[in-house]
Amino acid sequence: MAKAREGVSKFGKFLSGMVMPNIGAFIAWGFITALFIEKGWMPNADLAKIVSPMLQYLIPILIAGQGGYAFDGNRGRVIGSIAVFGAIMGTDYTMLMGAMLMGPLAGWVLKKWDEWAKSWKPAGLEMLVDNFSLGIIGLLLAILGFYAIGPFMGLILVILQGGVQVLVDNGLMPLLAFFIEPAKVLFLNNAIGNGIFVPIGTEQVKAAGQSIMFMLEANPGPGVGMLLAYALFCKDKTTKQSAPGAIIIQFIGGIHEIYFPYILMNPKVIIGPMLGNFVAILFSGIFGLGLVAPASPGSIIAFASMAPKSQLILVLLDVVIAAAVSFVVSAPLVRDASMGDDSDSDGTTATVTKVKGVVSKIVFACDAGMGSSAMGATRFHNRIKLDRPDIVVEHASVDEVPADADVVVVQASLADRARKSAPGADFVVIKNFLQDPGLDSLYQQLVATSAAAGVGSTDAPSVAQQAEEPAGKRVVAIDKAGIQLGLPSVSREEAIKAAGKALMDHGSVDASYVDAMLERDREQSVYMGLGVAIPHGTNAAKGSIKKTCVVLLQYPQGVQWGDEKAYLVFGIAGANGEHLQVLANVARALEDEEVVQKMRTTTDKDWLLKVLG
């Protein structure tokens, strides 16, 4: 069963790989349709002439070209575009499904030809052979598309339309929800959305001006309702904290892939989205709702934009109903679920590998490489860019991790596939891309041990270099006067200001640096985890630093830092990376639970200096 699911997931990922790079074309076509057709928001007969050719020719050619590219690079892109044109002209129906077949087929055929032709191509005539072979094979495939693939795909579309009509006539359309939601979780959302529902909906729009088909897979309501249940009732603290961010990404950004892991970690929760979509489709059918073009991506913004003016309120209500039903059904399933803090959905233990050597590229990998990993990479990049601007953070499919990746961040269920793709990389195996202890640990290692890795500021001495310097020449980043113990609890902002004042008292910074410390925490929390926060200024405030200094403020009762408490607050002003040794020692000290507990309550400054220096 697991192999079958993986196979289906790979197939869905491949189809997504053809569609996702061309989402911009769908968005452009969707807005042109919504704005300028006869029933649009700004009817314009001249501009409406763009609608049909864009869908009939441009989008299928883009999809087929991407499918060919996956097999044979730019040559595959060209032959895929040639081949699908025959299929387009061979039928009156929109050839999105035909493009998903013709593009990869053409790319695969040309790749096999190129592999065979390597052995006999005459020297000096390679370009001539390559161009003529592409043209001739493309011609043959275009003819095949015209006489066979196009009519065949048209016949399939007619059959599917007939099946949909049977469901409509018998009041069974809502049953599609029990197919759509499980298929989406297997990353088939783009396949069923753009491959099945969009072509059928396009034909319906020609006759009726709108189609319910555009609402079936793209409705953001079912996913939002389920995520809201996680945000309010999940027992797992990390998962609960990540859910609000996922709601924004899914509801506003239209990236439905972000909620798939929440279902995979507790599969029975899928009942909520299925029933939510079921009720939404039923509601849409009763009131005859539809969109004038695909809501791509499936966000509330796209849904509202593609709704007919006369139905806008009802279409939005349809989304609200889907979310409400999904939430009510999902809430008890989420509340009763047992999810350990250290296990992923497959029961495997999440692991964090200590990164080795210089890290210059981090890759977030998910199944399709287009949804959750993209959001995770963006979030982590924003988190680390102020501290480690030298590190590149990217996202990719688990099967296509770049060979030069130093660290790969991946969910446990996909880790084995990712390791095959990047056997030489270090791996951080996590439960959730948005907020996970593994990501906190990775961030901590990259920032706190950057000197040991020999990276960071080009002027910064490495740990080894600092150790070799005579004691009299060594920069002392922290001293006894910079340690304040037993402080009463204060607010987060007051703790940052107190750390800034301690740095000013040491003659390390001027007053403007304290404001930069507050700004840095607003941009990205300086809470590191394990009861430690490291307030420091933004990169723009480096000019306010007069000399390197690290101060430590101990709060035995803790300072509330979001949902966590910080007991040790390290104020940092780093010039030329001289503070990094202290942070490296802090990171090492935090690996020992007994040391951490003692640091929170000790009254011995000499012991603390020994641990930190």
Image (cartoon, grey):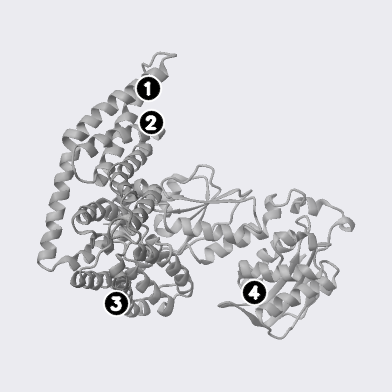
In the image, residue 98 sits, relative to residue 139, either above or below, namely below
Q: Which residue is mark 2?
A: 75
Tag 4: amino acid: Glu
Q: Which residue is mark 1?
A: 130
* Numbered label attached to residue 594: 4
For residue 74, which quarter of the picture?
top left
Mark 4 touching mark 2, by CB under 8 A?
no
Say if residue 341 shows up in the picture. Answer: no
Whole-number angstrom distance, CA of label 4 to CA of label 2: 61 Å
Whole-number angstrom distance, CA of label 2 to CA of label 1: 9 Å
Label 1, secondary structure: give it: helix
* Numbered label attached to residue 325: 3
Q: Nearer the viewer, residue 136 or 558?
A: 136
Q: Nearer the viewer, mark 1 or mark 4?
A: 1
Mark 2 touching mark 1, by CB under 8 A?
yes
Whole-number angstrom distance, CA of label 3 to CA of label 2: 49 Å
Mark 3 and mark 2 lie on one chain; the one further toward the N terminus is: 2
Q: Nearer the viewer, residue 336 or 503?
A: 503
Tag 3: amino acid: Val
In the image, residue 111 sits, relative to residue 345, either above or below, namely above
